Image: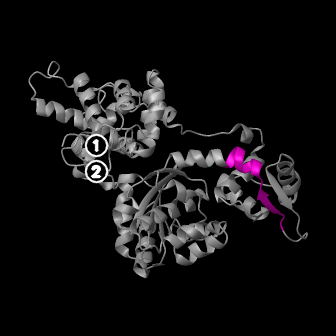
Amino acid sequence: MQGTLAIGAMPKSDLPFGSEFSPSNIDLKTVLEFAAKHGGDNKAFENAVHDAFFSEKKFPNTSEYNRRKRANNTNLGLRAYRIVDDNATLTEFGKTLHELRDKPKELHDALAKHILLNLHGTTLVQTIQDMQASGEDVNLNSLREWLDERGVHFPRGGKHASMMKLWLERAGIFSHSGWRINEARLQEVRGIGTLELEALAKLNPGQRFFLRTMLNLGTTGKTSASEVEKLATATYGFKYNEKGLAKDILYPLEKAGYITVEKTSRAKSPIVQPTEKLLKEIFEPLLQQLEKQTTEDLRPLLRKPLAEIVKELSSEDKHIKGLALETLAFKLMRFIDLDYVMTRLRGAATGGAEVDVIFESGRLVFSRWQVQCKNTGTVSLDDVAKEVGLTHFLKSNVIVIVSTGDIGSEARRYANKIMRDSNLAIVMIDRGDIEGIIGSPVHILDVLNREAKHAMKLKVLEL
């Protein structure tokens, strides 16, 4: 019957079905008003869409069956974009759009932000940027292949990506010709940029880096001040006065209401703990901004302790296991304040076996970190070779292999040879390292320092 076709009957796609749900075919304000009026009645909604946009007068050379099909596809597109439910009733997001229907800029910005954050839009944009940087021609066929490599699929011959692009174009993210991206509009709409909260800006650099390091650790519990200082120094390159740490850093932050300081014996470092004020004014906004860069299913995991994430790697549910693996990489790299760029392969796409996550840093010099997480017993030579092969494509400086098992001896020998013969650094983090980091997140510095010294020995210049 008309109006009963389910989205599940269409080819599987990670990008939302668009078809006639396109700004070139319909007016968003009008269809939102139709949904508000006819919600709960698919037939009435589709009749209204048909009469407004797909009537015989507008499509005289199209059969009535196909005109009705276009109206039905518009309904399906609205469902795929999560604007209406199966009964053409506005969802909570749909109601938000409906409230903005008389404000065209805000309306299209809200839809674009939803696409970027919840419908793989950010992956689409990042993939196009990668293609353009490598000189690759962007078209639906090449784009589908590049997205496939990142674990995001849409059917062969499908227009899902181009329909999504048209809505992002309405928000000014794409130009009206070609696939050129307006970076300033992208950041503005997505709401992600360099966040310098007013509260942090009022602090001196040492105090600011100390707080940011506590937040990177993601703990609400007690921590040794010396461990935080050690990680802050390594991460931001700030030289603290060890003897003046309490006077210059800890007590001013305590007076400002951001931390509590618990004195210990003279031989031991004070214990610090974040206050509700710090968590509310600084930690929560930073975390919310970080969550905007990730997919919906990953966001709740970013708030979980590392130990819980590692436990979920043993889940029998492949999807949960895959997400936990991605979150593991995310948390380890956030300890040293690297910036998340993208996920190449989602855990769900690989059955939880492995996931590639890309990070960058612009402190002092630019570096790109290619993190491969493997939830297998042993990392093999082939695993490392695959990552080395990808560095040309990803333009990475550092490969990080994170294994919940062991690093095989052949894999280590091969990594050593690559480091001797190239400018790449390959960091190996195994099960024992992860256990040490769970016990004390600052242990990641010991791991990275160990790997750095190892690389230096391999790369000694013979002058």
Q: Quadrant of residue 370?
A: bottom left
Expressed as whole percent of the image width and height from the top left, the position of residue 328 reads 52, 64
Q: Residue at x 69, y 51 (%)?
A: 212
Residue 281 appears in the figure: yes
Examine the structure image and report whether residue 18 is included in the region drawn in magenta: no
Residue 11 appears in the figure: no
Q: Are marks 2 and 1 in contact (CB under 8 Å)?
A: yes
Q: Residue at x 25, y 50 (%)?
A: 145
Expressed as whole percent of the image width and height from the top left, the position of residue 292 reads 52, 45
Q: Which residue lies most toward the top here?
A: 57
Residue 52 or residue 232, whichever sits in front = 52
Quarter of the image where the N terminus is located: top left
Within 10 Å of disc 1 (Cα), the crowding (few <14, some 14-19, many 20+) is many
Q: Mark 1 highlights which residue?
A: 17
Q: Given the image, on which type of amino acid does mark 2 rest? A: Ser
Q: Given the image, on which type of amino acid does mark 1 rest? A: Phe
In the image, 102: left or right of 167? right
Q: Which residue lies most toward the right here?
A: 266
Mark 1, secondary structure of its residue: loop
Residue 51 or residue 323, whichever sits in front = 51
Q: Mark 2 highlights which residue?
A: 13
In the image, 69: left or right of 459? left
Expressed as whole percent of the image width and height from the top left, the position of residue 109 reads 45, 30
Vertically, is 326 above or below 182? below
Q: Quadrant of residue 334?
A: bottom right
Marks counted in the figure total 2
**Residue extent of the magenta highlight:** 269-283
Between the residue at mark 2 and the residue at mark 1, the CA separation in whole angstroms equals 8 Å
Vertically, is 367 above or below 75? below
Vertically, is 16 above or below 446? above
